[in-house]
Amino acid sequence: MGSLIKKRRKRMRKKKHRKLLRRTRHQRRARGK
């Protein structure tokens, strides 16, 4: 059971990272304008 929880946490980390990248991209475009 413990190994499954670790795998799920890794998947969630990847999804959170993608959301952060999208936010930073929007901020950079706003600053450029």
Image (cartoon, rainbow, N blue to C red):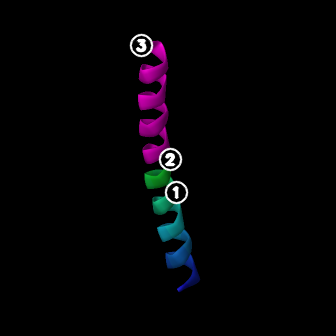
Q: Nearer the viewer, residue 17 or 31?
A: 31
Question: Residue 16, position in %: x, y?
Answer: 48, 53
Q: Is residue 23 above or below residue 16?
A: above
Residue denoted by label 1: 13
Question: Residue 21, position in %: x, y?
Answer: 47, 37
SS at mark 2? Answer: helix
Specify whether residue 11 is painted magenta: no
Q: Amino acid at mark 1?
A: Arg
Q: Residue 26: give its label.
A: none
SS at mark 1? Answer: helix
* Numbered range of the magenta stretch: 18-33
Upstream in sequence: badge 3 or badge 2: 2
| Residue at the spot 45% in from the left edge and 38% down from the top edge | 23
- Which secondary structure class fits the magenta region best? helix
Question: Residue 26, position in %: x, y?
Answer: 41, 30
Q: Nearer the viewer, mark 3 or mark 2?
A: 3
